[in-house]
Image (spheres, grey):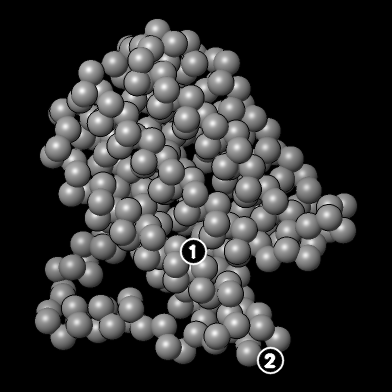
């Protein structure tokens, strides 16, 4: 329910923006998108926000323009890949501006855009779970598997947000709950019903499924490191000196673009079989 409410809100806001655009507004949006001269030369966090934004947008253009090059059965998967990176690019634009507006040159720090970050994740991470269902449809995957993965991803994100932004004193507890949902997802795709379907499909589908599984197992582990770097707990002595925004930004670029490239490669290999 939370996922669909947020998705409706983003779509409504996007439609409202585009229906009220004129030439002057388009120019302002373009200038705002590209304008980075106020960024301090040593603001490495702001730099990763900008690079992340541009990388996600470039990936979106690539995925959207390549859709019609493949069989109909893979177009939805490519479309979802483009939506994941496009939604992330829009949120990175806002996160970059939020960071720059709160950046203090004296300390070299700004406020972490936690709310924007989790709004982005509550939309994009479930879509990443949808990718498993879409590539496994050829092996008979049912929607129940998709909804189970979406539900677990929402639990993972909601509990993570509570620990990072609402109940920071008990961040370790909420992080534990979030990690539990993550491990159930990892088990399902590595050893559960999703794995069985991938084996049944074989060929390019099995290779793509394995690649996505590795992204979840290795790529998604980047996020708990960022979580521990930005919240109080017994782990402060290990990760306390790291900047959670740089960690999150690297994780997003690797996982979201990587997911899309795996699906793109699957579509290419399937077309050549």
Locate the C terminus and report the quarter of the image it occupies: top left
Q: Which residue is mark 1?
A: 116
Image location of residue 13, percent across then percent down: 29, 64
The quarter of the picture where the N terminus appears is top left
Residue 20, x across and y down, in percent = 16, 74
Residue located 21% across and 48% down the image: 64
Q: Quadrant of residue 243?
A: bottom right
Which one is nearer the viewer's eye here, 257 or 140?
A: 257
Labels 1 & 2 near each other (Cβ < 8 A) = no
Crowdedness of circle 1 by 10 Å Cα count: few (<14), some, many (20+)?
some
Outermost residue, front side: 272
Q: Farthest residue to the bottom: give it.
A: 106
Q: Position of residue 246 (x, y in %)?
A: 60, 64
Res 190 quadrant in image: top right
Question: Which mark is first along the chain, 2 or 1?
Answer: 2
Q: Is residue 221 visible?
A: yes
Nearer the camera: disc 1 or disc 2: 2
Q: Residue at x 28, y 26 (%)?
A: 269
Mark 1–mark 2 Cα distance, whole angstroms, equals: 25 Å
Give the image quarter of residue 237: bottom right
> Which residue: 37% across, 58% down?
56
| Res. 141 in view | no
Q: Is residue 36 above or below residue 3?
A: below
Residue 39 placement, left or right of 63: right
Categorize mark 2 by other alpha carbons within 10 Å: few (<14), some (14-19), many (20+): few
SS at mark 1 in the image: helix
- Percent position (x, y) of residue 52? 45, 63
Q: Secondary structure at mark 2?
A: loop
Query: Image height check: is 126 above or below 62?
Result: above
Mark 2 — residue? 106
């Amino acid at each position: 329910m939370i996922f669909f409410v947020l998705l409706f809100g983003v779509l409504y806001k996007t439609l409202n923006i585009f229906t009220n655009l004129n030439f002057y507004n388009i120019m302002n949006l373009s200038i705002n998108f590209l304008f980075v001269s106020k960024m301090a030369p040593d603001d490495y966090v702001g730099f990763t926000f900008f690079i992340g934004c541009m990388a996600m947008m470039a990936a979106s253009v690539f995925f959207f323009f390549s859709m019609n090059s493949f069989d109909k059965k893979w177009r939805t998967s490519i479309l979802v890949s483009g939506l994941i990176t496009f939604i992330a690019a829009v949120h990175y634009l806002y996160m970059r501006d939020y960071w720059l507006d709160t950046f203090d040159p004296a300390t070299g720090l700004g406020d972490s855009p936690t709310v924007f970050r989790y709004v982005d994740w509550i939309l994009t991470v479930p879509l990443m779970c949808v990718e498993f269902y879409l590539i496994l449809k050829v092996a008979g995957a049912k929607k129940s598997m998709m909804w189970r993965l979406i539900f677990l991803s929402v639990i993972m994100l909601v509990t993570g947000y509570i620990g990072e932004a609402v109940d920071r004193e008990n961040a370790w507890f909420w992080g534990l709950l979030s990690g539990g949902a993550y491990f159930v997802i990892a088990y399902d795709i590595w050893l559960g019903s999703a794995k069985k379907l991938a084996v049944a499909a074989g060929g390019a589908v099995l290779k793509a499924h394995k690649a996505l599984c590795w992204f979840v197992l290795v790529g998604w582990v980047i996020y708990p490191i960022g979580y521990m770097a930005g919240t109080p707990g017994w782990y402060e002595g290990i990760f306390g000196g790291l900047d959670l925004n740089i960690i999150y930004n690297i994780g997003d670029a690797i996982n979201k673009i990587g997911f899309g490239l795996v699906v793109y490669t699957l579509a290419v290999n399937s077309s050549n079989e």
